[in-house]
Image (cartoon, rainbow, N blue to C red):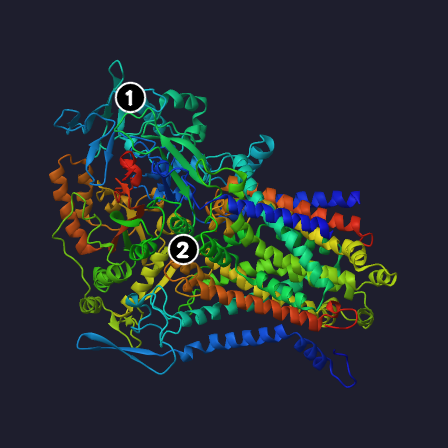
Amino acid sequence: MTTLAAGDSIRNHLWRRFCQHRLAIASLVLLGILAALCAAAPLLVQTATIREVDGVDEVAFGPGLWRYTDTGESIDTGGRFQPSSAHHWLGTDDLGRDLLIRLLEGGRISLTVGLVAALCASLVGVGIGALAGYFGGVLDMLLMRFTDAMLSVPVLALMIVISMVDLTKLGLGWLVRMRWGELDVAGLAKLMFVVVIFQWMGVARLVRGSMLTLKERDFVMAARALGAGHARIIFHHLVPNAMAPIIVATTLAAGSTILYESVLSFLGLGVMPPTSSWGNMLSSAQEYMRKSPWLAVYPGVLIWLTVTAFNFLGDGLRDALDPKHLAADGRA
Amino acid sequence: MKSYVLRRVLQAVVVLFLFSVALRALLDAMPGDPTLMAMFNRPNIKAEDIARIERLYGTRDPFPVKYAKWMTMVFVKGEMGVSRSEGGRPVSELILEYSWNSLQLMSLAFALSLAIAIPIGILAAVRQHSVVDYATGFFSFLGISIPSFWLGLMAIYLFAVWLQWLPPGGMTTIGAEGGGVSDRLHHLLLPVLVLSVQTIAVWIRYTRASMLEVIHEDYVRTARAKGLGEGQVYGKHALRNALIPIVTLLALSIPELFSGALITETLFSWPGMGRLLYRSVINKDHMVAMIAFLILAALTLVCNLLADVLYAVVDPRVRLS
Amino acid sequence: MRAPTQRLILALLVLVLSACGDDSGPTAPADATAERRTITIGIQQEPDNLHPLFQEMSASIEVGGDTLRSGPLSAGLTVRGADWVLRPWMAVEIPSVANGQWRVDLEKKTMITTWHIKPEACWEDGTPVTAKDFIFAWKVKMDPNVPVVDNSMEKRIASMRGEGADQKTLVVEWNALYATADEGLVCLPSHVEQKVYDQDPGKYKESPHGRKPLSNGPFRLAEWAPGSHVVLERNPKWWGPSVQLDRIIFKIIGDTNTMLANLQAGQLDAISPVGISFDQALELDKNPVAGFRVVFTPGLVWEHVDFNLDNKIVGDKRVRQALQYATDRDKIVGEYFGGRQEAAHSWLPPKHYAHHPDLKKYGYDPKKAAALLAEAGWKRGADGTCVNDQGERLTLTIMSTAGNKVRENIEQILQAQWKRVGVELVIQNQEANVFFGVTMRERKFPHLAMYAWSMSPTSDGENLWTIENIPSAASNWVGQNTPGWRHAEANELDHRVPTTMDKDERIRLLRREQEIWVEELPTLLLYFRTETTVVRNELQGWQPTGTDVGVSWNCHEWHFAK
C-alpha cells in the first residue's frame, strides 16, 4: 500500500506506485535492453575486408560477435538459409545475411518510427484537442466532427491510398532523392505521415476531455484574473495538468504505431528494401514458411513483445499517474 | 433530443459529401492507371488507341466534371455503376455479395468474442487482484499486441498444414461434398478464431474497466449493505450500469461487421469487403471504391450517432448538446 | 445475465464440435475413382473477365482462353502447343502460300487469307461456328465506342466475308502486309452476342459473355463463385478429340502460403503457373510433397534492366558493357535460382526461330569491366566507388516493382556484385501501377529499370527497338522502346521483318539485328523466366508451354493414370 507519508515528494510517490506494477517495470527493462541492443549492434558486428590474393578473394574478419555475411559482401547467395552457427546465432536469411543483425537493424527502424510517430501524433493531438476543449463552441464542434470523420474512415484503405501517393507530384521530389546511406527516407517519411494522421485522434479526444474539466478550475480563473493570455493559459497551465493521459496515450500510440508500420510494410507499402524493418522482414519471410519458418517467427515475436511491452508500460504509467484508475480505497 | 439528432444527421450529410470529394480526389491523384498499365504491355498500341480509351473512360476530364458525372449517375439516374477491375460486374452486386461474406465471418467472430470476453471481463473485475484477474490481464495484453497477419499465418500452418484439423482457407469445399451449413462453419472456424483473438482481448479490458468503475460506486455499496446477495448486487445493479459503455462500444463496432478484415480475408482467401476495398483502391476502381467507402462511412456515422443517443437514453445524467 | 451467456457458449461449442466431427478429412471424396475425373487447380489470381475482347489478366486466359489462344472454354482457328509449332485447330488447315490460302500482293502490299472452318466446329449450344462469328468479332473490335485495348491486327484488315452455303469459309482481305496472319482471328458467338451489341454498343463491355461465356472449347462454364472458385465441366457438344476429364475446378487462393497449405492438405491436384513463387517451387522441388512433382518449363518472359540511353553515364556504351561484364549471371542462376533459369544472351529466347547461336556472349569478367569503366573515364576512388574527372561518383539508381521478392533480391545481388567494380547502386522501387503507368511510360527513370517483357514465338524487334516507338509526349507516351535506342541500321531491319513474308529472310534479318544489339547493349541482359507448375504424379498430359498461352491449352488431353 502506498500512502503519502510526510516529507515524501510527489515524484517518489509516483515512482513507488509505478514500481508496484511489476509488469510495467519488466516492460521498461525489456524495451531498454532492446533499444540498447539495436543501437549497439553495429559495434558488435565483425568488419570484413576483402582482398584479392592470386585472383581469389579472401575475406578477413575483424573483432566482433557476429558476421553480416560469410563472404564479406552485403549479400551471399551461396550461404542462404543457413542454420544457427557460431557466427550466425540465428542463422542466415534468404540472401545469406545474418538474421540477428537484420533483426536488430530492423528494430532500430521500427522502434524509431514507433516513438517518433507517436510523439508527433501526440503533438498534433494535443494541439487540436487543447484548442477544441479550451475554446469550445463552433471550433470545438468543427474539430470534433473532423475527428469523427477521420475515425469513420476505414483506416487501412486510406493508409494504402496515402502510401501510394507520388511524392514528386506534390513537389516533394527532394525527399525522394534524399539519401541517408541505405535508408529509405521517402518511405519512412510517408509511413510516419500516415501513422500520425491516424493516431492523433485518440490523443485529441483525451486532451479535449481534460480541457473541458480543467478550464473551469480555480487556478485558471486566477490566471485569467492576473491577465494571462489564452496561449499562456493553455500551454503553461492546462496542458501540463493534462500530461498524465497524454503520456499514457503516447506510450500506447507507440505500440500501435509499430503494429501499423508492420502491417504497411507487410503489404509492401512501408519501408522498402534493402532497409530492413520487422514488418518487411515478416513480409519477405512469408514465401519461405515451408523451408525456414523461423524467418517469420523471429520478427513476429519481436513485434509482439515490443507492442506488449509498450502496452504494459502505458498501463503502468496510467496507474501511477492517473488517480481515477485506482480503486476507491487507494489501492493501485 | 430530436433537434440534436437532426443536427447530427445534417452534419453527417455534409461530412459524407466532403469525404466523397476528398476520396475521389485522392483516387485520381494516385499515379498510374490500370488500363494504361495494361496497354504498356501491348506492343501494338498507337497514340490514337490511348486517346480512344481515355475518351471512353473519361480519364482526361477535369475533376469537377468527373465528380459531377458520378454524382448524376448515382443520385439522378440511380445507378451505382460497374466495376472496372472486377470484370464489369455491377457495383451493387459486388458489394452485396462481398459484404454478405464479410458479415458471416465478422458476426461469428463478434458473437464468439462477446460470449467469451464479457463473462471473463466481469469475472476479472469482480475478482480484482486475484490470479484470475492478473492472468486475464496478461493474456489480453498479449492478444492486443499480436500482429494479426502473423497470427493468421501461424494458425494456418499449425491447424491446417501440420495437424490438418481445419481447411487452409476458402469458403466451402468445392463440389458435391461442399455447400452445406456445417461445411461452411468448418471453413469459418479458423478465420473466426484468428479474428476473435484480438477482439476478445480488447473487449475483456473494456468490460473489466467499465465493471470496475461501477463496482466502486456508492450504490453498489448500498446494495451490499442492504444485504443483497452477490448475484443480485452484481447482476442486477452493477452489471446493468456497466453494460452501458459496452453496448456503446458494440454499436461503434457494427461498421466492422461490413468492412471485414483485409489481412485475414487475404490469408484465408475469404472474398470479403476488406479485400474488395483494398483492391478497389489499388486498382483505382473508383466506381466500387466510392460506393463502398461511402456506405461504410455512412454506417459509421450512423453508429456513432446511435451510440451517443443510446448513451443519453440509458444514462439520464448525460446531456446531449 | 449469466445463464443466457452460458447457453450461448454451449450452443457455439455444439456447433463447432459438430462441424469438426462432420468431415472425415480435408477432402471427403465419396468414391476414389470419381475423384480422378476431376482436377482441382490452384490459381493465385481471379480471372477478371472471360470475354475475349476485354480480358486483361493471364488468369483469364488460363481459365478460359480467348479464341486466339486456346483454352478450356475457347478454341481458336489454330493452336500453338508446347513445342511452339502452329497447328490447325478449328481450321481445316493453316493458310499458307503453298496451299493457296494465303495470297500476297507485294506491289500493292495487300494479302488475302482464306480459312476453312471445320464442319463439326460448333458452340456449346450446338450452333455451328461460322464466318459470321469472326466478322462480328472484327466489327466489334473496330468500333471506336467499344473499349477494346488492342485492335492493331484488326486495323490491318480491310474486309471479311463468309462464303459457302454453310458459311464455313472465311475470306479475309488485308490492307497491309502482316507476317503472322496465320495465327488466327478472334470469334464470338454472334447468334447470341449480336443482339447484346445492337442494344447498346457503348455498353457492350458489360455483356454477360464476360461472366457466362458460351464455349466452343472442350469444357463449358458450370459455376463461377467470385473470389472463391470456377468450375468447368465437360462440354457435351465438344467437336474435337475426346476429353478425359469431367470437371476442372480452379480454386482461387490469393496467398502463396495458403496455396502450399492447400497442396499439403491434399486439396489440390495442380498449381497453375500463376500460383507460387519461384523460390517456393525450388524448395518444393528439393523437399517435395508426397505424390507431387514440380515442372520447370523454360519461358518467354524476358527479365532485363533497361538503360536510359538519354543519361550521359549509361548512354556510354562502354559503361553498359562494363556493367554487363560485372554481372555474374552464372552465379545468380546457379546459386539463387538453383540452376533453373536460363541466362539470356539476346532478347529472343533460345527456342525462337531466329535464335542466333553464335552471338557474342558476356560472361563474368570484372577485370574487363574495370578496364571498360576506366576507358569511359571512371577510376576507382578512395572509398572504392569510381569517380570521374569532375569528381562525380558513379552512383546509379535502379527502379523496379515493389513487392516482387525476386526482383528485390536480384537488385540487392547486383548491388553487391557491382560494388566490386566500384559502382554504387541505389535501389528505388515503386508500386506496379506507378512504375508501369507513369515511370516507365514516360521514361522517368534516371538510369536503370528492371522489369520483364513477355515475348512470343513470333516476336521480332519492331515494337521494342524502332525509333518511332520511343515514348514521347508527342505520341502520348505510346511505345515500348523505353531505353530510347536509336540505331539507323537496326531500325531499318526492324521495319522490314514484320512485312517480310519469307521466313528464312526474316531469320537472316533478325540475326543481323541481334548482332548489332548485343554490341550496343541497350538493356542489361538477365535471364528468361522459367514457368513453374506443380502437378500430381499421376496426371498425364500436363504440358506447360512457357508462352502466354495457359497451361490449359491441351486440357482435353489431361487424365489421371491408373
For disc 2, the chain is C
Image side of residue A263 versus residue B36, left or right: right
Q: Residue furthest right?
A: B226
- Pointers 1 and 2 in contact (CB under 8 A)? no
Q: Quadrant of residue C552?
A: top left
Q: Is residue A52 left or right of residue B264?
A: left
Place of residue B97 in the rendered image (x, y in percent of width and height, measured from the top left): 53, 38
Viewer-proximal residue, A29 or B185?
A: B185
Q: Position of residue C150 (x, y in %)?
A: 33, 36
- Tell me if I can see residue B277 in this picture: no
Identify the residue at the far bottom of this view.
A7
Residue at point 18% right, 61% down? Answer: C363
Where residue B68 appears, as percent x and y from the top left, is 56, 37
Query: Under tag 1, what secondary structure?
Result: helix
What type is the residue that disc 2 sits on?
Gly
Q: Which residue is mark 1?
A: C131
Instruction: Give the residue number, with chain letter if any, for mark 2.
Output: C403
Q: Is residue C240 above or below residue A234?
A: above
Quadrant in which residue C124 is drawn:
top left
Q: Is residue A56 left or right of residue A155?
A: left
Badge 1 crowding class, 10 Å Cα cut-off, few under 14, some 14 to 19, many 20 or more, is many
Dot 2 lies on which element? Answer: loop
Q: Earlier in the sequence, mark 1 or mark 2?
A: 1
Against C507, is A246 above or below?
below
Q: Nearer the viewer, residue A168 or B135?
A: B135
Mark 1 belongs to which subunit?
A: C
| Image coords of residue B38 (percent x, y) | 37, 42
In-front residue for pair B212/C38: C38
